[in-house]
Amino acid sequence: HVQMQESGPGLVKPSQTLSLTCTVSGDSISRGSYYWTWIRQPAGKGLEWIGRVYTSGRTFYNPSLKSQVSISLDTSENQFSLDLVSVTAADTAIYFCARAELGTTSFDSWGQGLLVTVSP
Amino acid sequence: QSALTQPASVSGSPGQSITISCTGTSGDVGGYNYVSWYQQHPGKAPKLLIYGVGKRPSGVSDRFSGSKSGITASLTISGLQAEDEADYYCSSHTSSSTWVFGGGTRLTVL
C-alpha cells in the first residue's frame, strides 16, 4: 500500500522560493507505471494541478505556472520535489503530492497535504 | 487552460439520487475517456471515486457512477447518505498532456 508524505517549510517570504518534497513509501518512483504530481488548493477554493514528472525525468507543467515551477525526482531517496520561485500571497495554499496511473491518468494516491503560507 | 465547469452546489435528501455535471471542451473531457471524480471531506485529501469516465476503484461504493456525453461528464450518487456530504471535483487529462480540474461542487445532504 503506497503512502505519500509532503514535507517542507510552512512559511515562505514573498519573492523567495517555495521548496517541497514528497516521500513515497510502499512503491518505487523508478517503476514506470505512474506520473508523480503536485496539486494545490488555496483555502476554501478548488484544486489546481501544478505539474508532473515521469520516471524518465520528463516534466509537464500547468501553463499558468510554467515560468515559476520546477519538479524533479530523487530516485535514491524515493522522493520527488517541487520548486516554486518568486512566490506571492497568491501561492498560499495546501500543497498535495499525488500519484497518477499511466493507463487511467487518475490520481489514485495522495499525500495528506501541507499548508504553505506566503507572508513577510 | 480553463477549469472545467461544475455547479457550485447541489443538495438532496437521504435516499435520493443527485447528479453533478462537469463541462469541458473537445481538448479535454470531450476528447478523451480520461475523466475522473474525487470526493473531499473537510480537512482531508481528495479520494478517487471514479476513473476512466465510469470505472470504480476497488472499495468504492456502487452508489457512485460516472458517465459522459460529448464535452460533459456526470457523477451520479444514488441512495444519498449523510456521509456523502462533501466537495466533489472532476478532472480530465488534456490534449496538452496536462490535467485540469473542475471548480468543485459542494454536496449538502438535507
Image (tube, coloured by chain):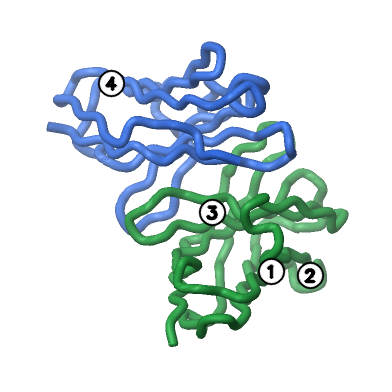
Label pair 1/4, CB-CB below 8 angstroms = no
Residue type, label 2: Asp
> In whole angstroms, how far apart are the C-alphas of marks 2 and 3?
18 Å
Disc 4, SS: strand
Other residues around mark 4 within 10 Å, as few (<14) / some (14–19) / many (≥20): some
Q: Chain of mark 2?
A: A
> In whole angstroms, how far apart are the C-alphas of marks 1 and 4?
39 Å
Q: What residue does disc 4 label?
A: B18
Say whether mark 2 and mark 4 are on the same chain.
no
Residue type, label 3: Trp
Say whether mark 3 and mark 2 are on the same chain.
yes
Of pointers 1 and 2, the one earlier in the residue sequence: 2
Point out the frontmost of discs 1 and 2: 1
In this view, the residue in front, B102 or A32, is B102
Other residues around mark 2 within 10 Å, as few (<14) / some (14–19) / many (≥20): some
Label pair 2/3, CB-CB below 8 angstroms = no
> In whole angstroms, how far apart are the C-alphas of marks 1 and 3?
15 Å
Residue type, label 4: Ile
Point out the frontmost of discs 1 and 3: 1
Q: What residue does disc 3 label?
A: A110
Q: Which chain is blue?
A: B
